[in-house]
Amino acid sequence: MEPIEGMNFELPEELVQMRDTLRRFVDREMIPIERQVRSTYKTDPKPIATLTEKAKALGLEGFDVPVEHGGMGLGLLAKTIVWSELARSIALPSRGGAILGPNISPILYALNPAQQEKYLKPTLAGKYRWCFMQTEPDAGADPSSMRTRAVRQGDHYVINGNKRFISFAGDSDYAQVIALTDPEKKARGGISAFIVPIKTPGLKLVRQQELMVDDRPWEVTFDNVKVPVEDRIGEEGEGFKHAQHWLNTGRIRHGARSMGVMMRCLELAASYAKQRVTFGRPLADRQSIQWMLAEMYTDLHQLRLMVHHAAWKYDRGEDIRNEAFMCKNFGNVQSFIAADKCMQIHGGIGMSTDLPIETLWRDQRSMQITEGPTEVLKMTLARHVLKEYGG
Ligand SMILES: Cc1cc2nc3c(=O)[nH]c(=O)nc-3n(C[C@H](O)[C@H](O)[C@H](O)COP(=O)(O)OP(=O)(O)OC[C@H]3O[C@@H](n4cnc5c(N)ncnc54)[C@H](O)[C@@H]3O)c2cc1C
C-alpha cells in the first residue's frame, strides 16, 4: 500500500545536516571541556569565549535573532535542533548560556524604534546584558498577585517594591521590570513592563540567593525608582501580556533542551551498562537495567515527536499554547527522571563531579519549578481539557 499523503515525520535534509554538524561540535569541542568549565557555580568565561569563537564555523550565529534585526531568523523547528543538540553538554550553563549570538528576550522586539535604538541594538551587538524582573517574595507561580507598584507622576513613573530570584541582575546593564500600575485590574490590564537601567538611583541589589543549581539569582529592592514614561514597554497595562508571551515561547525551548539532556543520559547510561560488571555479568544483561534504558528511549521518542510537532505547527502560523505547556512539562519531568535513572545505573560515580550526571539532575529538577511550575502549567492545560472534552 502507498503511504498516506500529507503525513511526514522526516526532518528536512538541511536540518539533518545541521543536527549532525552540531552533534560533532558538541562531541569534539564541548563535552571534553564541560567539567572544567562548570566546576563551580560561576561558569569560567575564558573557555566560553574560545567556544564562541570556534562556534562561528558552524555558521549559526544569530540563529535566534529575526532577519530584520540582522540575525538568521531560523524557524522554530530549526531552533529546537540547535537547543537540543547544545543541551547534550553541560559546558554552557542551563540558564543564559549563549555561544551563537546573544540571548534576546522576545519582549525586546516589542520595543518602539527609539527604545530599540537605546536598548535592543547595543544588546544585539553584545554591549548590553539584561535581566527579567517579575518574581516577588509573595508572587512567584502566581505573578498576578505582585505588589511592586509603578505610580505615574507626570512624565515618569515611581517604582517601589521587592523582587527576588532575579537571574543575572548583578551582571546586567538593564532590567525588564514587570510592575503593578493598577491594583484594581491586576493581570487584566493593571500590570505594565518597563526598561530600567540597573544603575538607576533607588534600585538596590540586596543579596544573591545560594541554590542547589549554579544560578545565583538576586533579591532586588525598588525605593522610589524614577523611570521616564518613554521607557515603558508598550501601552500601560500590557506588561503581563508581554511577559506571558515570552514565557510561552520559552516552553518549547524547555522541551528541546530536555531532549538533549535525555539523549546524553541515554548515551552515558547505555555505554556504562555495557562496561560495568557486577556479580560476574555486565549491568546491560540485567532486565531491571534494560527496562530503565527502554523507558528512557521511549520517553525521548515521545518528547521528540511532541517538540517537533509543536515547532512545525508554530512555523505554519498556528497557535501552540497547549502544545507548549505539554512540551515544557513532559520534557522537564521526563528528562529529570532520565538523569535520575542514569545516576542510578552509574552507582556512586554517578553522583561524582567527574561526570556531568549530577549537574543534569540538579538542572532538570530546577526546571520543574522555574518559568511555570509543573502544577500551574497543568492547571492551565486542564482548563482547555475541560472545555474540549467536558461537554
Ligand atoms: C534558579 C532560578 C532562577 C530564576 N530566575 C528568575 C528570573 O530571572 N526572573 C524572575 O522573575 N523569576 C525568576 N525565578 C523565579 C521563578 O520563576 C519562581 O521561583 C517560580 O515562578 C515559582 O515561584 P515561587 O518560587 O514563588 O513558588 P510558589 O509560587 O510559592 O509555588 C510553590 C509551589 O506550589 C505549587 N503551586 C503553586 N501554585 C499552585 C496551584 N495553583 N496549584 C497547585 N500547585 C501550585 C507548585 O508546586 C510550586 O512549585 C527564578 C527561580 C529560580 C529557582
Image (cartoon, helix red, strand yellow):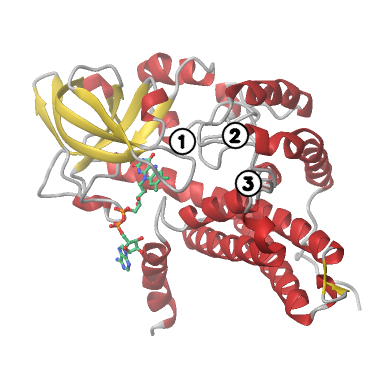
Nearer the observer, 38 or 320: 38
Give the quarter of the figure containing the N terminus: bottom right
**Residue 62 appears anywhere in the view:** yes
| Residue receiving disc 3 | 353
Image location (x, y in percent) of residue 288: 73, 79
**Which of the two discs, 3 and 2, labels the residue nearer the N terminus?**
2
Q: Residue 10: x and y, percent?
A: 80, 57
On residue 122, the disc is none
**Mark linked to residue 64:** 2
* Figure disc tally: 3
Separation of residues labelled 1 and 3 (CA atoms): 35 Å
In whole angstroms, how far apart are the C-alphas of marks 3 and 2? 32 Å
Check whether the beta carbons of the residues at disc 1 and disc 3 lie within 8 A of each other.
no
Left or right: residue 86 versus residue 137 is right
The dot on residue 106 is: 1
Name the residue at 38% across, 78% down: 386
* Residue 387 in the image: above or below residue 78: below
What secondary structure is marked by label 3?
A: loop
| Corner quadrant of residue 38 | top right
Quadrant of the drawing holding the C terminus? bottom left
- Which sits earlier in the primary sequence, circle 1 or circle 3? 1
